[in-house]
Image: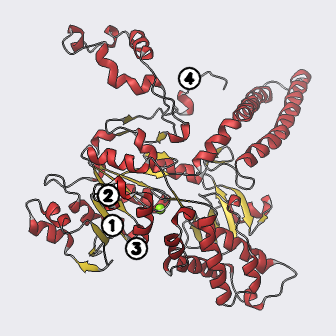
Amino acid sequence: MYYAITTSLLLLLIPATSFLLTPPHSPSHTLRSTKSLDFEAIRESVDSLPSPPPLDPTYDVFCNRELNMNSLAAIGFDMDYTLAQYHVPEFDNLAFDGAKQKLVDMGYPEEVLKFTYEPSKWIRGLIIDIKRGNFLKIDKHKYTRVAYHGSQEMSSEARKALYAQTFNKKDSFGESYYINMDTLFQIVDAELYSQLIDLKDSEDSEYEFLDGKTYEEMYRDARACVDLCHRDGVIKDEVAKNPSKYVVKDPNMVPMLKQYKEKGIKVFLVTNSLWTYTQDVMSYLVDPSDTESGDWTDLFDLIIVGSCKPAFLVDPRRDLFRVDKQTGQLTNTDGVYEIAALNPNGATKFLEQGNVYQNGNFNQLAAMLDLDGKAITGEQILYVGDHLYSDVLRSKRTLGWRTALIVPELEEEMKTTESQKDTSSTILKLRKLRESISVKSNALRLAPDTPENSAQLESLETSDRQIKEALVDIVGAHHKAYNPIWGQLFKAGYEDSRFAYYTANYACLYMTKASNLRFVSDQRAFRTFNTPPPHANTNTDEQ
Ligand SMILES: [Mg+2]
């Protein structure tokens, strides 16, 4: 489950305004018994204060795990799809079209060049079974809810035969032939791979080349071609030439970064992109007038490019190189040993020689973030990224960092949820009605077998069937309202999706874009309001 931090005035203002009712000099300040507190009076006082300007809910920050911003010593950011959002489909088409050409160069049929990119067919959080050419949406219990082979929906029998968990089939979706779609970059891979599968399977095509390829080999080829586009200039040269076509400018990003830096919180960037691309994108996002020296790197205490996450977060042996900002040339450093040798204030002296680095690892980052001689602990770092595994799961599980996941898709998802409110309510009411029918039917089945009981039971069973049929239609339309194929990002059937499960477990916070943190002060305390477990749920609200 995931829980929204609402913009409720009451919750926002209680910490800041409690002094109005119990000033420090008042005798009541020492009272600890709740009997002495007049909560209604506090509520009225809070309610009487002016409301903050209404915030579009898509600018909100949502909380899965309690987090007090004033406990943070550093905030770090990923770049791609975190600080830098991209125009879709323009940006994705660079990789899609570039990879098509590379596939043809490898021997794939010319037909591949006719593929067109349709990102709306995809959502993040899916699993690709590259051994069989299938795309799966699973819930938090690893039950496969929706399955496609290429662009063809699989029958429920085929889906269950392949993916239902039995004692004989122990696939955990952790095997190497299952690929998790944890970043928006992979939507290009999925679309390209899906069309290759269709081409291989099509009855009227006879491509010997494809006959000789397994589904897994086709995936690996597509992945390699897309990856090459990210490295050989197909993408980066175009973005450098025409950044406004591909990169989304966000007016709140620079103020957000400055806001935390001015409060004494260290601000850093850790990106897998290399220096030249990072420089191209960030110098477009940050106007020279935004910083005193005209250089975007001033906004950060520390920048690490080419970080190779997740290796950066788990491998302590990776060397750290200093990047010359003018030439891009790398020089060796001794990282943590050099900082220790420069002590006292080794980190400051080290960063005075340059604040842009490549490669490295989490230990060197912690040493460079050294605050007044005291190394920062994992709990004092908030890392903001879009990659469910590399940025969020790995940093939380390995290093105990606090984490924030960027979910640009959430904006559309929230709008659909709003427009589907009545439908959601109807579905819930009908499900609760089925539960009541089940309870009453159960009692009748346990009661003496009389003609009257039998008639009542039959009537209940008929009603249940009718409601079940109605639900199939309503739920189907509800699912399609989000995405015609995969439905809701955060739900799979009535359960949380795998994406929702990992978000809830590993992302302390999540939001549509990193700049939403502009509306979060360095003193904000995020709280969760968990739903009680079924046995303790005393909520009688029918909704
Ligand atoms: Mg990223």
Q: Which mark is residue 304?
A: 1
Q: Is residue 86 above or below residue 272?
A: above
Residues marked 2 and 1 touching at CB (< 8 Å): yes
Q: Which mark is residue 268?
A: 2
Residue 537 at x, y percent in the picture? 55, 27
Residues marked 3 and 1 touching at CB (< 8 Å): no
Q: Hey, what amino acid is under mark 4?
A: Thr
Q: Which mark is residue 538?
A: 4
Q: Earlier in the sequence, mark 2 or mark 1?
A: 2
Q: Is residue 37 above or below residue 500?
A: above
Measure the alpha-carbon separation of dots 4 and 2: 45 Å
**Residue that carries the numbered disc 3 in the rendered image:** 276
Measure the alpha-carbon separation of dots 3 and 4: 57 Å
Report the mark closest to the observer, 1 or 4.
1
Residue appearing at x 79%, y 44% in the figure: 477
Report the mark closest to the observer, 3 or 4.
3
Q: Hey, what amino acid is under mark 3?
A: Thr
For the residue pair 224 and 305, the one nearer the viewer reads as: 305
Task: State the image quarter where residue 12 is shown.
Answer: top left
Measure the alpha-carbon separation of dots 3 and 2: 18 Å
Residue appearing at x 56%, y 66% in the figure: 185
Residue 273 at x, y percent in the picture? 43, 70
Q: Label 2: few (<14), some or many (≥20) within 10 Å?
A: many
Residue appearing at x 72%, y 89% in the figure: 212
For the residue pair 426 and 386, the one nearer the viewer reads as: 386
Report the mark closest to the observer, 3 or 2.
3
Task: State the image quarter where residue 235 is shown.
Answer: bottom right
Residue 407 at x, y percent in the picture? 53, 51
